[in-house]
Amino acid sequence: MNIVAIVGSLRKDSYNMQLAKTMQERYKGKLNIKIADIGSLPHFDQDEENNPPQPVKEFKDAIANADGVMIITPEYNWSVPGVLKNALDWASRVDKVFIGKPVMTLGATMGMLGTVRAQMHLREILVSPGIQAKILPPGGNEVLIGFANQKFDEQTHQLVEEGTLNFLDSKVEAFVDFVKLV
Ligand SMILES: Cc1cc2nc3c(=O)[nH]c(=O)nc-3n(C[C@H](O)[C@H](O)[C@H](O)COP(=O)(O)O)c2cc1C
């Protein structure tokens, strides 16, 4: 199963990127997870949307060809980071590559609430007319990782907290089943 991961942080030591890489490694027998390079996308410009720059074309092609998308993002100021919104805005125009695409959302933060406010905004964005993703239904299927600085190994940069890994396994399993159904 081919999955594109979109990570909402460009920070070198990003916990969300570490989560994406942990998942790439942990599920490699089952999932081929490719991490999109949203840092190379220019600011969205509607004048460019019909013939966008090459990084935008590659980003949109990757989503169009994926079986599913994982959005792994921190919360910035109670919402999604601008860099993620920018990527979603590009994807929402012209060929609208997210329509009907299975999407799972995850987030890690050093704070207590595990990005819940960002994920609630993200869900609203993902059902807008230009996106219309098929989101893994809520009700226990949100992966919200609080106190991230206590759950990742500083040397290996992998998520190591056992309870969180078990939870992640069950939610990824639910997403795989969801992708097969959609
Ligand atoms: C601009 C900015 C705004 C932030 N706002 C929030 C917030 O609203 N809620 C929260 O839990 N953490 C917030 N944080 C803290 C981030 O969750 C924390 O820096 C996290 O490690 C960022 O994710 P990353 O490690 O993947 O880069 C904010 C950080 C930045 C830089």
Image: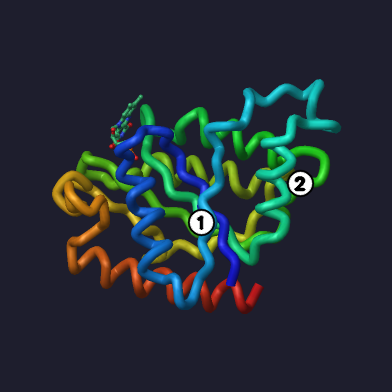
Which residue is at 69% across, 41% downward?
91
Say which label, 2 or 1, has the lower sequence index. 1
Q: Identify the residue under disc 2.
A: 96
- Relative to residue 166, is residue 119 depicted above or below? above
What is the quadrant of the C terminus in the image?
Answer: bottom right
Q: Is mark 1 within 8 Å of ligand 1?
A: no
User: Horizontal and vertical percent for residue 56?
Assistant: 69, 37
Rendered image: mark on residue 148: none
Residue sticking out furthest to the right: 50
Which residue is at 52% across, 47% downward?
6
Quarter where residue 26 is shown: bottom left
Q: Gap between marks 2 and 1, in whole Å?
A: 17 Å
Is residue 3 toward the left or the right of residue 22 in the image?
A: right
- Relative to residue 145, is residue 24 depicted above or below? below
Is residue 46 toward the left or the right of residue 146 in the image?
A: right
Give the amino acid at mark 1: Met
Q: Identify the residue under disc 1.
A: 70
Regarding mark 1 in the picture, which secondary structure is present there? strand
Regarding mark 2 in the picture, which secondary structure is present there? loop
Give the amino acid at mark 2: Lys
Near mark 2 (Cα within 10 A), the count class, few <14, some 14-19 or many ≥20, is: many
Display coloring: rainbow
User: Horizontal and vertical percent for residue 31?
Assistant: 50, 71
Near mark 1 (Cα within 10 A), the count class, few <14, some 14-19 or many ≥20, is: many
Q: Quadrant of ligand 1?
A: top left
User: Horizontal and vertical percent for residue 47?
Assistant: 81, 21
Which residue is at 50% across, 59% downward?
104
